[in-house]
Amino acid sequence: MSNRELIALGTGSQVPSRVRNHNGYLLRWDSNGFLFDPGEGTQRQMTFAGTPASAITHVCLTHFHGDHCLGLPGVIQRLSLDGVHRVHAHYPASGQEYFERLRHASSFHETTEVVEVPIAADGVVAQGDFGELWARRLDHPVEAFGYQLVEPDRRTMLPRLLRHYGISGADVGRLRRAGTLDVNGRTVNVEDVSVLRAGQRFAFVMDTRLCDNVFALAEKADLLVIESTFLTTEAELAEEYGHLTARQAARVAAESAVRTLVLTHFSQRYTDPQAFHDEAAEIFDGEIIVARDLDRIPVPRRPRPK
């Protein structure tokens, strides 16, 4: 099992159906867990997925429409019940009142430290061993932000070049830390025996019309999770209510060099998921996944240099 994967806890939009729960997405990224937009039923969906509350290190809300946040009270209370020490919560600053209501929706014994990180502008909202978590404003009837996880580029040491220069054992670590190493009177630079390996990228784009920031979030994403509430036959509805069609989501993926496209947030009016795949495939020739509840989708690995 990949240690970097997306667990789709819910893939429906405003009204859940018999087969699709309200939104909820958990990105497991090494030792971190990013819970995006927990709608109603998220806590129960986590149980079905076999995912403990202790996996959550960050909660990220795109906006304060109910299908993206009404599961938050249960999740917050579950964190304390399960003894989670600290969680960071990211959300639009304009919805502070809603966040307070959701966080204290009922009486409970709160022990988890919830570090609130309200977002008022585009920029980095968290940093850690995962890299940087960016937020960028979207175009929806209420203030909304999308998220982008950017892992830093790292150097990968190449064994054949290390052997060529006679470097082995603890000297490899010394070279990596110092950047240079003296080998038999010859200075070897870390660039001589390594290549720069691009970090992985993840993007999460929910309720929005097409705008520049949708493309900025999706740029070179290994995994793009993006709403496709409607098909093109309802493009006018999508524009009116601030949503994307499957064709528009595919355009974003195609123009942003995305590797894997995950479509989600489907209107309950549709019963044939294949229609979303087919519409997107007319525009995007990469991997397309029409998300289903409880799907586990690995973040594609970057090819290792030789």
Image (spheres, rainbow, N blue to C red):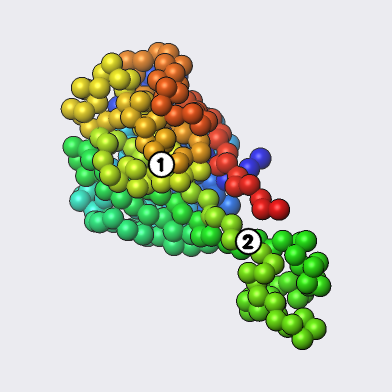
Please say whether residue 62 is visible from this viewpoint: no
Q: Amino acid at mark 2?
A: Val
> SS for tag 2?
strand
Q: Amino acid at mark 1?
A: Ser
Please say whether residue 139 is visible from this viewpoint: yes
- The image quadrant that residue 167 belongs to is bottom right
Q: Residues within 10 Å of mark 2 (few under 14, many from 20)?
A: some
Residue 264 at x, y = what percent? 41, 29
Residue 70 at x, y = what percent? 32, 37
- The image quadrant that residue 20 belongs to is top left
Q: For this rendering, which residue is in front, 69 or 102? A: 69
Mark 1 and mark 2: span between their CA atoms? 24 Å
Q: Is residue 99 above or below residue 230?
A: below
Task: Give me the residue at 27% from left, 31% from top.
Answer: 243
Instruction: State left or right for residue 211 relative to residue 72.
Output: left
Q: Is residue 127 above or below residue 229?
A: below
Residue 75 at x, y = what percent? 42, 43
Instruction: State left or right for residue 150 relative to residue 175.
Output: left
Report the residue marked by disc 1: 256
Task: Give me the residue at 66% from left, 79% from top.
Answer: 180
Task: Give me the residue at 71% from left, 53% from top.
Answer: 306
Report the residue marked by disc 2: 195
